[in-house]
Amino acid sequence: MSKEPQFSQTWDLDSLLPHPETDGFRAKLATFRSDLARVAEESDRLPPLTRSAASTGAWGEFLERYAAVAATASDLSSFVSCHAAAEAGNKLFQQLEATLASFEPDKERIATNVELALRDLSPDDLGAVSGAHPTLAANAFFLQDRRQRAALRLPKELESLAADLAVDGIHGWSRLYDRISGALRVRVMERGDVVEKSPGQVSLDSPERSVRENNFFAADKSWTSIADTCAEALNHIAGTRLAIYKRLGLTSHLDPPLRYNRMTRATLDAMWSAVTARKRVLLKYLAKKAQLLGLDRLAWYDLHAPLPQAACLGERSLSYDQACEHVLKTFHGFSSNLGKFAETAMTKKWLEVENRPGKRQGGFCTWFPTARQSRIFMTFTNSPDSMSTLAHELGHAYHSHVLKDRPFFLQDYPMNLAETASTFAEAVLNEERLKAAASRDEQLVLLDGMLADAVVYMMNIHTRFLFEDRFHLERAAGEIPAARLGELMRAAQQDAYCDGLAADGWNPNFWVSKLHFYISSLPFYNFPYTFGFLLSTGVYALAGEFGSQFAERYERLLLATGSLPTEQAVQSTLGYDLTQPTFWNKSLDVVERRVEEFLELANRPHS
């Protein structure tokens, strides 16, 4: 008799809001629409923020209404996204996603009015005014952050014009890329037949090198066919940004992404300097992996190839219940708070993991501020990798849980800090998996996965940063053709990978295929990934330093991410200065230790 499953594989959404097909949901949406419009109109009439009781009172009441409507917006967006992900073909859910997108102009209108109203206040004046009203005092960091963001705003009339033009301008070029890349098909050989696949279906992780190589060049041929159009899109997205930056008087194209991530240029430079100084240790790993694969040097399409030892281990099947139990045991071992939270998420049906047709690809964690609950979406495939994804998404959810009692505007954290808790939770699980590995081959395969991630964050992401930085500098002088973009990409790869791949093994068309370069809403969508990886790795490395206080320090760090700039969040909780190399080197020490462990295992004779 089969054992009854302990943990549900489908989530509960009905306890959050009425189903999207019901009158109750339509009424909720209509109320939100009118509330948002009313708050947007109110933002147009905000008085100057002064120390007068009338001014601070008006702003305090406005912030309360703004927070309420923003929380509802978050609830509705998360709710519709959950339903649309679980039923990818549902036309109603797709329509509702478009409806919610139509509310963006009013949301942007409010943000613009708030930021421009704060722009002319000095930090001291804003601090004094904030202390004159309890709601302003509770949201002091939000007001300070928005005041600083105002430096990225044009005058109100121009900001409104730019937002209108962006729909068919910068965002139009981004949508064009989405359309042509989404329609792209790759012709590959499969079981003797030529079949067409979308680029996302063409993998480079086959154990057979001929398959990896053929897949890579087939995909490259397809991407090359749209390179000229993609070059137009990339040039105009960057050109629009540079024109606005010039009008704003910004001195660097890195100013906006640094502002959005609440961090300084000194921190960014310290991180990349530390990575550049020590990343060559990964060349030892790449060389040994090439040797294990029977190659002189790896090519781009070999980076994610499985080790021969992986085939010897076979496919290890892992039930969802087993994965949940293992994650719970590991999380409880780190912190009772983390363990109890994960148990709540699993038993209260906050997770949708069922492997069934009709779901969207990928995974995510989303937050419902009104209910103070998260929901996690993924597809569990009975594999250790799926268990790692489960831990990763639970880490995101725990981050939101730690911040749940803060004012709404202090529950938000920037992208560079968003991956900290998730990557940290995954690291806790993977370190335990490594300790529990039953054989040398299993340890080797686990370390290969960890070091492949390090290569992504320290070399692949660095490639993207170097390319995008150099591209923006060169784009200021005029448009750049596709051929030159390929040259810039190849040079960035050779620098970022320390020339560690085969001479003919680079991917100069990577700029065509990487979606992140074409995201029009957020510039430089790359370095936050490296930052999050190294921050979480460094935090994990501090466990011995803080001993029994480590879990509490970790929670304090998560709490600080919503109410302090990045550097202050780390300094105030962990005592490290991110503008100096010390912390980053602690992270890189972990990577180096893993390389040495990999080499030792790879060189160890079979017993």
Image: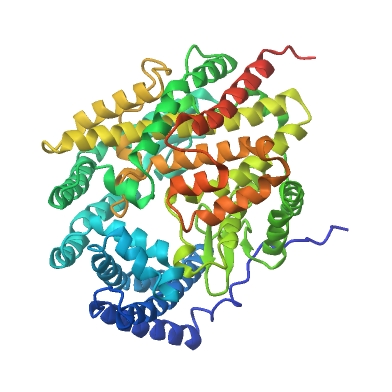
Way the structure is coloured: rainbow
Q: Relative to 78, say whether 522 is above or below.
A: above
To which quarter of the image does residue 159 belong?
A: bottom left
Relative to 411, is 527 on the left or the right?
left
Image quarter in which the N terminus is found = bottom right
Image quarter in which the C terminus is found = top right
The furthest residue to the right: 1
Q: Relative to 170, say whether 433 is above or below.
A: above
- In the image, what residue occupies the spot 57% across and 66% down? 404
Relative to 325, is 184 on the left or the right?
left
Look at the image and tell me whether residue 40 can be seen. yes
The furthest residue to the left: 478
Q: Relative to 179, say whether 541 is above or below.
A: above
> Where in the figure is residue 545, as x and y percent of width and height?
66, 36
> Where in the figure is residue 501, as x and y percent of width and height?
42, 18
To which quarter of the image does residue 458 belong?
A: top left
Look at the image and tell me whether residue 183 can be seen. no
Q: Nearer the viewer, residue 28 or 158?
A: 158
- In the image, what residue occupies the spot 15% across and 48% down? 249
> Where in the figure is residue 26, as x and y percent of width and height?
44, 84
- In the image, what residue occupies the spot 29% across and 29% down? 489
> Where in the figure is residue 377, as x and y percent of width and height?
56, 59
How many numbered callouts?
0
- In the image, what residue occupies the spot 40% across and 27% down? 273
Relative to 7, is 302 on the left or the right?
left
Q: Nearer the viewer, residue 561 or 308?
A: 561
